Image (cartoon, rainbow, N blue to C red):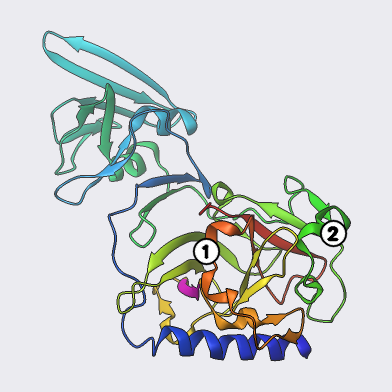
Amino acid sequence: MKKLLLAVLAGALSVSLIGSGTESAAAAGAPKQVEVLLNTIKMKFPDAKPFQDAQGSVMVPIRFVSEALGAKVTYSKEGKVSKVGVYSKDHKVDMTIGQTSALVDGQKKDYGTQIILKQNRTFVPLRLVSEGLGEKVEWDKIGRWVWIGNKDFRSTDDKKFKLTKLSDFKAYTKSDVYFKNIEGKRFSGIKIIKESDLPLQLGNSQIVYSIDMVKRKATGRDLVQIRSSHRGNPIAFLMKNNHVKGRSVIDVSFVNNGDKTGMNYYPVISESDKFQNGEYISNYTDWMNFKVKQSDYILLEDGDLVDYAVAIVNPFK
């Protein structure tokens, strides 16, 4: 109950500082890099990156995607004509650089966008991957992500994510109230994740897709933006040998993406920092000077987490 009361008070202070929230919360920035996710895990490209061309077609480097799916890629040249072949157990694709069509299992298919050579890599339209390799492919315009394969999300329950005992994390647990579950029992430990681990399910609860820093259009203030399958879960900034700085979501600024995800926004600066481990310090003025880069971790609170807490290494340092 004490934790709930603090969250409500903090949320009220946050909203009063940020504004009504009726206008768009975040100012638009430069388009994000296109990411490719294979079975919910982001693929790494050593040089040439996926991109969206001038007419809106999503282009992916065929070699890395094909090999990740177990297919073989061949290259050949006939005079000035460069050809690329992709062969898997069940499918065969023959392409010619500069053409908009390809032979998929012997049938000619036109993709309306040229197959191109860029940075010594062959880029093809996204639809060719699905039709040529028989994979389920989805374009996620919100995250600018290419989903290939299944959507069985990894969970922080997985063995890959090791449990750190709270006793080994004591430099960050000065505000003890943040390290108890909804029943008031102290967590056994904390799971530390990185931005590169996203998207990721927290236990068997919310899926956190991404975390970004944006600016509010009306005020220019910094906001943390988290895309999640849940609405309204709070966060907290963790600083070494300092009180935890809790942040409630600015609920009036929530954006429903229409794809079972939404954008939650959190203030960076909040008068709620006057609450320190359950005590209200009325003469505390340093709350106005807080900067995100001062925190080492961001606690991702979730009422459904019972055994452990989850914190992400601060990607904004």
Q: Residues within 10 Å of mark 1 (few under 14, many from 20)?
A: few
For the stretch drawn in magenta, what is the main secondary structure? strand
Relative placement, left or right, of 279 versus 41 is right
- Please determine whether, in this image, residue 231 is positioned above or below residue 240: below
Region in magenta = 262-267
Query: Is 167 in the magenta?
Result: no
> At 39% across and 90% down in the image, what residue appears?
20
> At 40% across and 41% down in the image, what residue appears?
134
Q: Position of residue 60 (x, y in %)?
A: 32, 38
Relative placement, left or right, of 309 versus 29 is right
Q: Position of residue 191 (x, y in %)?
A: 74, 55
Q: Position of residue 126 (x, y in %)?
A: 30, 44
Q: Residue furthest left?
A: 80
The quadrant where residue 306 appears? bottom right
Work out how far the residue at label 1 is from the one at label 2, CA to CA, in angstroms. Answer: 25 Å
- Please determine whether, in this image, residue 268 is positioned above or below residue 139: below
Q: Which numbered dot is residue 158?
A: none
Say if mark 1 contacts mark 2, CB within 8 Å: no
Q: Earlier in the sequence, mark 1 or mark 2?
A: 2
The quadrant where residue 98 appears? top left
Element carrying mark 1:
loop
Q: Amino acid at mark 1?
A: Lys
Q: Which residue is mark 1?
A: 291
Query: Is 265 in the magenta?
Result: yes
Q: Which residue is mark 2?
A: 166
Relative placement, left or right, of 43 versus 24 is right
Element carrying mark 2:
helix
